[in-house]
Amino acid sequence: MKAIVQRVASARVDIAGQTVGAIGAGLLVLLCAERGDADAMADRMLAKLLKLRIFSDEAGKMNRSVQDIGGGLLVVSQFTLAADVSGGNRPSFTQAAAPDEGRRLYDYFVHRARAAHPLVATGEFGADMQVHLVNDGPVTIPLQMA
């Protein structure tokens, strides 16, 4: 399971001109399930995200988590994180989970996130989404659970 995590001042997801998910300060999480991923990987990814200390404390050091600041999580499915371009210029997505399994793992992750954190918004799995964000820092961190 892979994720790109961005510390944001705000973020939202629009589908067909309608906002379907939005947060203020918090984390935008672009999430990708890959072949062979399991629920345990999603659990570890969520635990890491909730405790990731990338928000500034009073001294200006990255020492606070999204939980510490009461920030939001905006979780957006993005199978393209599994892209492989080693064989040419057209990406291959063979490492991405099959659509049914990708949706199941995404839904599992979101369900667990909502159980663990009070402010979770989402995009829509498989939809054509426009993601708007104000990256705070910028701070962008790739994560991978194996």
Image (cartoon, rainbow, N blue to C red):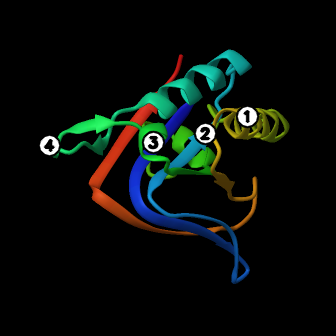
Verify CB contact (< 8 Å) between mark 2 and mark 1: no
Q: Residue at x 34, y 47 (%)?
A: 140
Residue 59, label in figure: 4
Extreme right residue here? 100
Q: Mark 2 or mark 3, which is nearer the start of the sequence?
A: 2
Residue identifier under label 3: 66
Residue identifier under label 2: 32
Residue identifier under label 1: 115
Indicate the position of residue 71 as horizontal and vertical percent values: 49, 50
Quarter the N terminus occupies: top right
**Secondary structure at numbered mark 2:** strand
Q: Judge depth for marks 4 and 1 and give the one in front.
A: 4
Q: Mark 4 or mark 3, which is nearer the start of the sequence?
A: 4
- The CA span between labels 3 and 1 is 15 Å
Q: Judge depth for marks 3 and 2 and give the one in front.
A: 3
Q: Three-letter amino acid code at disc 3?
A: Val
Visible residue check, residue 141: yes
Q: Please state the total of marks drawn on the protein image.
A: 4
Q: Would residue 61 be found to the left or right of residue 3 on screen?
A: left
- The CA span between labels 4 and 1 is 31 Å
Indicate the position of residue 42 as horizontal and vertical percent values: 64, 26
Q: Would residue 11 be found to the left or right of residue 69 on screen?
A: right
Q: Mark 1 or mark 3, which is nearer the start of the sequence?
A: 3
Up-down: is 41 above or below 5?
above
